[in-house]
Image (cartoon, grey):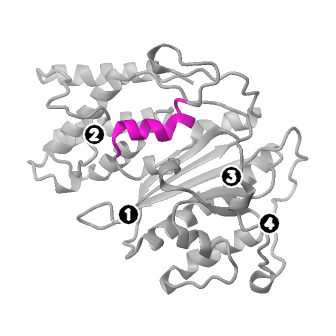
Amino acid sequence: MKSDKYCKVAFETVKAMLAEEGRELKSGKRSHKGPLPPGYKPELDITKELNVEKVQHYQQLIGILRWVVELGRVDIAIEVAIMSQYQANPREGHLEALYLIFYFLSKNPLRRLLFDARVPACDEDAFQLDADWTEFYGDVEEEDPPDIPEPLGKPVHLNVFIDADHVGNVVTRRSHSGIFIFVNNTMIKMFSKKQNTVESSMYGSEMVTMRVARDFIVEMRIKLKMFGCPIAGPENVYCDDKGVVSNTSIPESMLSKKHNSINYHLIQEVVAAKIMRVAKENTQTNLSDALTKLLPYSRKQELMMDVLWGRSTSGESRDGEIEITGQGLLPNAILFYVSCFVSF
């Protein structure tokens, strides 16, 4: 699924808006390759507040960008998620930041969202395979909806990457959650959003993100089963916080933060029911890191190779686009479901 056509329409819309003000879409003093500078902190902006007309203009641009992300441009998801937080009272600097994102789209209109049915490699040794949860949660099992259709076809594998930028907002000290969910090698859901609570530790912010991922996994398994798609075992969840991995994989591990006990038991129960399992993922290879903070664009490209650029099996084509061959086909139900995968 390519992005150049709808990005071109978005760019032309913004260009027409600026023309009414006698302006052009320019890069300004641009020293970065990505949509926004890696160190940009919109919460520290002290420029003049926008008037009512400009506020509406700002909200319209956010709406356009949200649709761009929804239609596949997940490489600007964190930028749009961050700037969406200022729709109630945006400033001039925030508006100029949106123009930088549109300028980036005008120079990088072509990205491809990959549909790849190949089953990714999985290191079974990374998971706690011999854990016995019976003493803590009894013989808990996954509850299937009534009248579930008979599963047909090849089983699908779900892989989930989670991360949190602890106290990423230097004013409110709230963290930012990022989640990627893959069916086989195809990304079908993305989540990038500021957390509703202030967490005092990295452990707490990662646990909040894990709980959100847990809810998505339960929801997605029900939907896939109702579509008639067989699911191959528990879902693989990858997290780069060792404490969270231990507390959600080892039954005897102790919870050191009592205020996280609800998330703690919610996650452990679905692990006990063999709905999901958790493994440690190195921060350098955690794909969801691109959904939690503003990274140098080269770093973001490296992380999103499996989402927008892919691992080349037939070589790179023009414009830096990468062709993937021999993927096979995903079930039609999954291709239908992928049209509603973005959450802010």
Q: Nearer the viewer, mark 1 or mark 3?
A: 1
Q: Could you give the CA–CA distance between mark 1 and mark 3, rounded to whole angstroms?
A: 25 Å
On residue 220, the disc is 3
- Which is more N-terminal, label 3 or label 2? 2
Q: Gap between marks 2 and 1, in whole Å?
A: 19 Å
Q: CA distance from mark 4 to mark 2?
A: 43 Å
Q: Is residue 293 above or below residue 187?
A: below
Q: To which residue does mark 2 refer?
A: 36
Crowding near the residue tagged with mark 3, few <14, some 14–19, many ≥20 C-alpha atoms within 10 Å: some
Q: Which residue is mark 4?
A: 142
The residue that appears at 19% across and 24% down in the rendered structure is 26
Q: Could one spot residue 307 in this view of the protein? A: no
User: Spatial distance from mark 4 to mark 3, Cα to Cα?
Assistant: 13 Å
Q: Is residue 291 magenta?
A: no
Residue 33 visible at all:
yes
The kind of secondary structure the magenta stretch mainly shows is helix
> Is tag 2's residue or tag 1's residue first in the polypeptide sequence?
2
Q: Amino acid at mark 2?
A: Leu
